[in-house]
């Protein structure tokens, strides 16, 4: 994230919005924007493209959470919500929507910055986990393709597993490609011919 965080504060009540803005202004140098109207939130947030979204809504609705999901891209940036009251369904919906911090009856000016910091830290932790999961999934898929290509070579040429892998590796080196790419080409070709 850049040195100066861009923060959107979504708060319909002007006095409460100013509490949050003043609290953040005391805590650091931020580029702050206040959105007081939830209608059209997705368009407004997309236009401003903030680093963090802070939402203070007395009674969030499922429609508001859906709009927030479209607006904030919780997978793209940290989102912290402060609500006056909630129920299990709304809490679950907020977390499933990707909200990084969900605080019930917790809007106190001195808590805004620590909650925001926790939301940012949690967001980055989950972002790393998502990246690691995608890398692992990709590696497993590549392993499956390599195993299928080895099987094809073993059957077609009467090779052992180690010999089939060595042949794949040599072909990859000769072509300046990755073993997984050569294996995918072999599997695809075999599928077309078979």
Image (cartoon, helix red, strand yellow):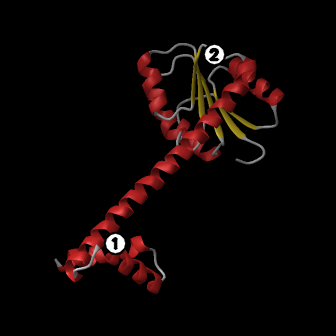
Q: Is residue 11 above or below residue 47?
A: above
- Give x and y (percent) for residue 80: 60, 29
Q: Position of residue 46 (x, y in %)?
A: 58, 45
Percent from the top left, x then y, of residue 14? 69, 21
- The residue lying at 65 percent from left, 38 percent from top is 52
Q: Can residue 173 be seen at all in this image of the molecule?
A: yes
Farthest bottom residue? 174
User: Image point 48% across, 29% down: which residue?
Assistant: 95
Against 5, residue 34 (above or below) is above
Q: Is mark 1 on a helix, strand or loop?
A: helix
- Gap between marks 1 and 2 measured at Cα: 53 Å
Closer to the camera in the image, 39 or 32: 32
Q: What element carries label 2?
A: loop
Q: Circles 1 and 2: CB distance less than 8 Å?
A: no
* Relative image position of residue 68 (x, y in whole percent): 51, 34
| Quarter of the view holding residue 172 | bottom left
Q: What number is the disc on residue 38? A: none
The numbered dot on residue 184 is: 1
Observer able to see residue 53: no
Q: In which quarter of the image is residue 18?
A: top right
Which of these two is toward me, 1 or 25? 1
Specify which label sits upstream in the sequence, 1 or 2.
2
- Residue 167 vertical placement versus 83 (above, below): below
Query: 126 or 54: nearer the eye?
Result: 126
Rendered-image quadrant of the C terminus: bottom left
Residue name at image x 69 percent, y 37 percent: 7
Which residue matches tag 2? 106
Residue depicted at x 49% and y 15%: 86
Q: Is residue 86 left or right of residue 193?
A: right
**Is disc 2 surrounded by few (<14), some (14 to 19) or many (20+) residues within 10 Å?**
some
């Amino acid at each position: 994230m850049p040195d100066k965080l861009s923060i959107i504060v979504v708060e319909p009540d002007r006095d409460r919005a100013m509490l949050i803005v003043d609290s953040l202004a005391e805590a650091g140098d931020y580029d702050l924007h206040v959105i007081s109207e939830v209608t059209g939130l997705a368009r407004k947030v997309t236009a401003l493209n903030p680093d963090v979204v802070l939402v203070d809504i007395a009674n969030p609705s499922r429609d508001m959470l859906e709009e927030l999901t479209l607006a904030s891209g919780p997978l793209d940036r940290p989102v912290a919500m402060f609500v006056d009251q909630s129920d299990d369904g709304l809490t679950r919906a907020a977390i499933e929507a990707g909200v990084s911090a969900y605080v019930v009856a917790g809007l106190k000016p001195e808590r805004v910055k620590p909650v925001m910091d926790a939301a940012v830290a949690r967001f980055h932790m989950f972002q790393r986990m998502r990246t690691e999961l995608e890398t692992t999934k990709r590696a497993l898929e590549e392993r499956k393709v390599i195993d299928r290509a080895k099987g094809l070579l073993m059957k077609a040429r009467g090779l052992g597993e180690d010999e089939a892998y060595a042949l794949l590796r040599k072909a990859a080196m000769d072509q300046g490609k990755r073993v997984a790419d050569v294996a995918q080409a072999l599997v695809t070709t075999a599928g077309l011919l078979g």
